[in-house]
Amino acid sequence: MDALLYSSHQQHGTSSKILLLQSPKFHHSITSSAASFGLLSMGLRSSKSLFGGIKRDKLNNSSKKVTDRIKHKVTSVYDRRFQESVIEEEAPQMSDINPSFKVSSGEAYPLGASEVEKGINFSLFSKHASAVTLCLSVLDGGKLGELDTGLVEITLDPRLNKTGDIWHICVEDLPQSGVLYGYRVDGPREWQQGHRFDSSIVLVDPYAKLVEGRRVFGDVSHKPSKFLGTYDFTSLPFDWGSNYKLPNIPEKDLVIYEMNVRAFTADESSGLEPNICGSYLGLIEKIPHLLDLGVNAVELLPVFEFDEFELQRRSNPRDHMINTWGYSTINFFAPMSRYASAGGGPTAASQEFKQMVKALHDAGIEVILDVVYNHTNEADDTYPYATSFRGIDNKVYYMLDGNGQLLNFSGCGNTLNCNHPVVMDLVLDSLRHWVSEYHIDGFRFDLASVLCRDTDGSPLNAPPLIRAIAKDAILSRCKIIAEPWDCGGLYLVGSFPNWDRWAEWNGRYRDDLRRFIKGDSGMKGSFATRVSGSADLYRVNKRKPYHGINFIIAHDGFTLYDLVSYNNKHNGANGEGGNDGCNDNFSWNCGYEGETDDVNIKALRSRQMKNFHLALMISQGTPMMLMGDEYGHTRQGNNNSYGHDNAMNNFQWHQLDARKKNHFRFFAESIKFRRKHSVLGRDQFLEKNDVTWHEDNWDNHESKFLAFTIHESDHGADIYVAFNAHDYFVKALIPSPPSGRRWLRVVDTNLESPDDFVPQGILFTGDTYNVAPYSSILFEAKP
């Protein structure tokens, strides 16, 4: 606990007041020196950890003259509701005190903490703030506990420490690492004007490159941990290796695997050492699995710093849940620190994240980040969780209505004001940081339609941020993918502003394929349109088929196994009475809701999963699959499992082992077949001569059979595919193969493994083929 002291003294003939916060254990007094810029009004809160690293002995000796005669009151580091006593001190007594560090006015740019010749420069934007206080603490031996033991506070003088809307200061004697920092910010309190200032809260710097909080994911002993920025200017630059190179995979060749870093190896069935389970290093250990599966890009669920305990801050129906998906960003620059191995903290997380990226790149796998720039963790005005932006300048960082209230196009209580120039710069700086510092290959933008709204929430035809991302030089090599909708109804599938660069999650593909393969009537034409590249959506200007990201399953919604096992969502475990999660799943349980021992139903479900996966892999466009679908992961019908840090989300490696020779084998062979056959991933839309539809029944609403041949014009390596969504056999007429070629059957999803997928093919010599109910076939023309 610390005591609050005021002192005034004469310095260079001018009176100024120094706010002193004293530790009862050390009773230190600190002043700025003549070498500093002098008349700053400074607030200093001392802690054992700080003085363990900076001139402790001198401070102990020199401060005793003052503190022997000072009465003080005890306060909490994070509680400003205390009494302040103004103590008049004589100038000579203060002049005997050795300063702990020097401060100077500092520079406005770059924003955040940066190393300069004289020390560490701190810079913060806040247009509407009236007072800014820099809070510092030095970790003692890197111990996390020091986060809560005390802070030194330096109040910035707007006459000396402010340039335009940027507050800045240079602290000259700080260590180059191991320092925690944040800000107290005060300003107007008129909520109706959009302000949410609260100087009792120490806030995270939006430009902090590292963030410190609890060290171990889900550690209940540190559940109420605070989050502060930190930095590391002592580590050598990361060694990417002399032979290192970026994969630079053409978009048309991508096969994306959506995955969660923690959930991939958190389960003990991963067989990894406990200290790397659920970590960046844990993912490295499982790269051989990704190579066996055949994917060449991973799309990582959010890896920016977030608080997994945010749902447990207060009593509520969801207070048993742990946020394991991470769609609740605290800071846009800092890698999730609790994905470091062995509780290593933010610096280790940064290094290990780079190790992970390097290992994936060395394996020929690109890294795409799922990024959340549509909202933050700070929730709404009813139950706010102020950690950064809200308290720094709510009116700038968030969209507000005419009454100063938060707009909510994200469904999470707030909406980031992305097309405000300051926020746009923040987003661009963040993206560039991840590309330059961490070598990221691309980004998928969560609820990207939010990024297409003006500062008042109205839709924009040419959003400045979307254009800036598309035109940015540093981001020019990156894949940029939009989730083209938001929770305010701005559905932009096929019409997302794109500048011929932006790709989109194709929600129409997902819905149409689900409906056709489960046997809905009237879906054959839509199915044909989707598997041939969704030209109705993307054949505009210079857009390509690969700008449509084809997916049937993603992190939110049913897994593939649950899609064929449940008609309805089963979200009781979430605590919201089943009111959360999407109701329009276009799923079919194949005759029984949930788990069953019925062998016929289980066989049908197996066929349907293979049908879905085959359709995905033969479709024009960029395919994306979900982690765990390669072995048939189930969430027991929960289609909104964001808050379950357990087997519901965690990859079950023992199940993979049990299904490796059948289900997994089919999925892996299908991916590898696609990657070997460029005709399935064209960079141009199909023309009339590129495909033959073996169909004269387009207008029959009840027809659920579709067959077609994709032509390979150079060598005649055609591919014939047929899908039967009827509940009866269909005798398909097989077309003649190209001259000098023969048909070989590669796939029949009705057959048991390994006959369901034969990579080398089995010779077929007949004219017709009986396609079983709810099954699909694929033939390849070979010499």
Image: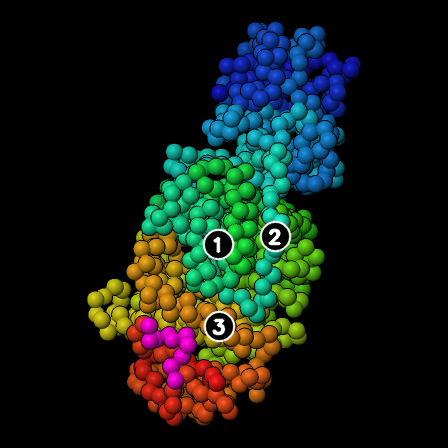
Q: Secondary structure at mark 2?
A: loop
Q: Which residues are magenta?
A: 754-763
Residue at left 35%, top 88%?
A: 769
Which residue is disc 3 drawn over?
Answer: 674
Which corner quadrant of the image does residue 37 belong to? top right
* Label 2 Cα crowd, 10 Å radius (few <14 / some 14-19 / many 20+): few
Q: From the viewer's perspective, is residue 257 above or below residue 223? A: below
Residue denoted by label 2: 243
213 versus 651 height, above or below:
above
Q: Quick check: is 761 in the magenta stretch? A: yes
Q: Residues within 10 Å of mark 3 (few under 14, many from 20)?
A: many
Query: Which mark is in front, 2 or 1?
Result: 2
Give left or right: position of 81 versus 169.
Answer: left
User: How is the protein colored in the picture?
Assistant: rainbow
Main SS, magenta region, reads strand
- Tag shown at residue 510: none
- The residue lying toward the viewer, choosing from 707 and 389, is 707
Residue 100 visible in the snapshot: yes
* First along the sequence among labels 2 and 1: 2
Whole-percent x and y of residue 411? 48, 55
Give me the disc on residue 301. 1
Cα–Cα span, label 1 and label 3: 25 Å
Q: Is residue 324 left or right of residue 457?
A: left
Q: Residue furthest right?
A: 13
In percent of the image, x 37 and y 67: which residue is there?
A: 665
Tag 2: amino acid: Asn
Indicate the secondary structure of the residue bearing disc 3.
helix
Q: Residue at x 38, y 33 (%)?
A: 221
> Which x, y percent locates residue 500?
65, 69
